Image: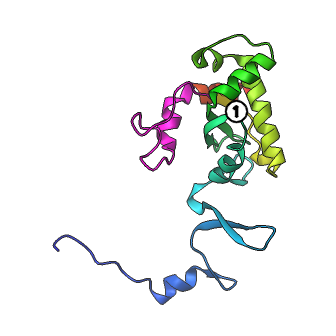
Amino acid sequence: MLGTTPPTNPTPRETQENIADGWFKTGDIGEWDSDGHLKIIDRKKNLIKTLNGEYIALEKLESVYRSALVVGNICVYADQNKAKPIAIIVPAEPALKKLAAENGIEGSSLEELVHNKKLKGIVLRELQNTGRAGGLSGIEIIEGVALSDEEWTPHNGLVTAAQKLNRKGILNKYKDQVDEAYSSSS
């Protein structure tokens, strides 16, 4: 096979550099559950350093915030020049319409509701409460939200065929809403 390079085994030195306190550092982020089981929750490369110098794990936050009834899909974004993250969500339409009706907000279409500032504030509070109930620390509680009226699919390039988020694509598409979410939280 021309042009292929066989995989190389790490040198003893490289292996030793990745061992700390008897543990081999794989690059995975884990946490122990209450039963003493180790659960992999993120990858080190998915950690974002915030303005305060603290690291947050985006996928961990998404797994907690995803439990909010109003969330259909979610992408948490943390600007390195800001103290806290924000969330871009595709709302679960029935839950969003119910929230709107319960709070006297008129609008029958998803397209109309996602642009309502009062409703965005209500959704933000719902997510913040979900984060606190899920045990997130203060630095992990989102400070703003952007709502999408478009489903994220492989066809529009916002998720892969395996339904993994295309973070860069989502951020590019919702840049104005992300900027607005950060500016309205200041």
Residue 25 x %, y %: 60, 75
Picture colour scheme: rainbow
Residue 173 shows in this picture:
yes
Residue at point 43%, 46% (across, down): 160
Quadrant placement of the C terminus? top right
In magenta segment, residue 151: yes
Residue 90 x %, y %: 59, 32
Mark 1 secondary-structure assignment:
loop
Location of residue 13 with respect to 110 vertically, above or below: below
Residue at point 62%, 52% (across, down): 59
Residue 37 relative to residue 42: left or right: right
Q: Which residues are magenta?
A: 147-176
Residue 119 x %, y %: 73, 21
Q: Amino acid type of disc 1?
A: Val
Quadrant placement of the N terminus? bottom left
Residue at point 71%, 43% (across, down): 65
In the image shown, does 111 or 146 lie closer to the viewer? 111
Residue at point 34%, 78% (across, down): 7
In magenta segment, residue 1: no
Residue 4 relative to residue 125: left or right: left
Q: Which residue is mark 1?
A: 70
Residue 46, quarter of the rendered image: bottom right
Residue 33, quarter of the rendered image: bottom right
Residue 94 relative to residue 157: left or right: right
Location of residue 170 with respect to 181 vertically, above or below: below
Residue 186 shows in this picture:
no
